[in-house]
Image (cartoon, rainbow, N blue to C red):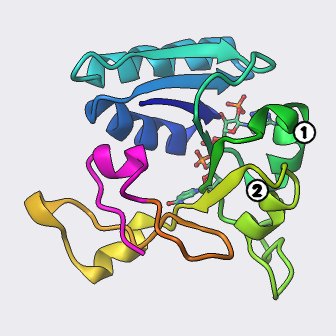
Amino acid sequence: MNIMIIGTGNMARGIGTRLVAGGNSVTLLSRNPEKGAELAANLQAAARQGASAQTVPFGSPIQDEVVILAVPYHEVAETIQPYTAQLTGKILVDITNPVKATFDGLATPPDSSAAQEIASLVPAETRVGKRVQYHLCRAAGQGPGGRPVPRCLHHWGRRQSCGDGLPIGRGGWLARD
Ligand SMILES: NC(=O)c1ccc[n+]([C@@H]2O[C@H](COP(=O)([O-])OP(=O)(O)OC[C@H]3O[C@@H](n4cnc5c(N)ncnc54)[C@H](OP(=O)(O)O)[C@@H]3O)[C@@H](O)[C@H]2O)c1
């Protein structure tokens, strides 16, 4: 499967490494060409089963079915604004911790969530999924082969597991609702 990751920071590195190791090709959408090229080279070195890693500049079109948002929550609206129309029909994976830019509280209303807020910014045909922190889920135990077990990846509002159909599960993690 081909996956786009928006951002080239710590989470893009971690998730990207697992994805290419699982045979999925990754395109990094980066506003920093040097950083993007360096991470793409690192991911390529970790790639297996013919997977590839590349970087494209921010503003390039989204070609992939799955898009992972790996930017700070307070940057999400600005980041996806130019891509709203292109996200129609895509799977958008929100991994953000919805903290304020000042890190002194949650940026989301008490009766909402990051995925819910992000879903309100994109077309109804965009499927927004949430990846819960897998390190928290480790408390739930280890999967076969000692793999960490995330609890997550369900569609906002429906609690419909989409882990089986998504590359996260194939990237070395188990997905469970
Ligand atoms: N679910 C989990 O398990 C988990 C765990 C930790 C963190 N997170 C969340 O994951 C997200 C990323 O964390 P991180 O540690 O990877 O952060 P990071 O290392 O600071 O990387 C953030 C990336 O976002 C890019 N970015 C920021 N604003 C942007 C914009 N307006 N347009 C385009 N790109 C933009 C940055 O670009 P530059 O490199 O050019 O600055 C950078 O590549 C955060 O929301 C964080 O809360 C989730």
Q: Which residue is mark 1?
A: 81
147 lies above or below 13: below
In the displayed structure, does residue 133 sit left or right of residue 7? Answer: left
Q: Which residue is mark 2?
A: 73
Which one is nearer the viewer's eye here, 79 or 175? 175
Query: Of discs 1 and 2, which sits in the foreground?
Result: 1
Give the position of the N terminus as an image quadrant.
top left
Residue visible at 9% across and 58% down?
Answer: 145
Give the SS element for disc 2: helix
Query: Is 74 one of the magenta-colored residues?
Result: no
Residue visible at 83% across and 74% down?
Answer: 108
Query: Is 164 one of the magenta-colored residues?
Result: yes
* Circle 1 residues within 10 Å: few <14, some 14–19, many ≥20: few
- Asked whether residue 7 appears in the rendered view, the answer is yes
Q: Earlier in the sequence, mark 1 or mark 2?
A: 2
Give the position of the C terminus as an image quadrant.
bottom left
Q: Are marks 1 and 2 in contact (CB under 8 Å)?
A: no
In magenta, the rendered stretch is 163-177
The residue furthest left is 145
* Position in image of residue 112 (x %, y %): 80, 80
- Asked whether residue 75 appears in the rendered view, the answer is no
From the Cβ of disc 2, is ligand 1 less than 8 Å away? yes
Residue visible at 47% across and 18% down?
Answer: 40
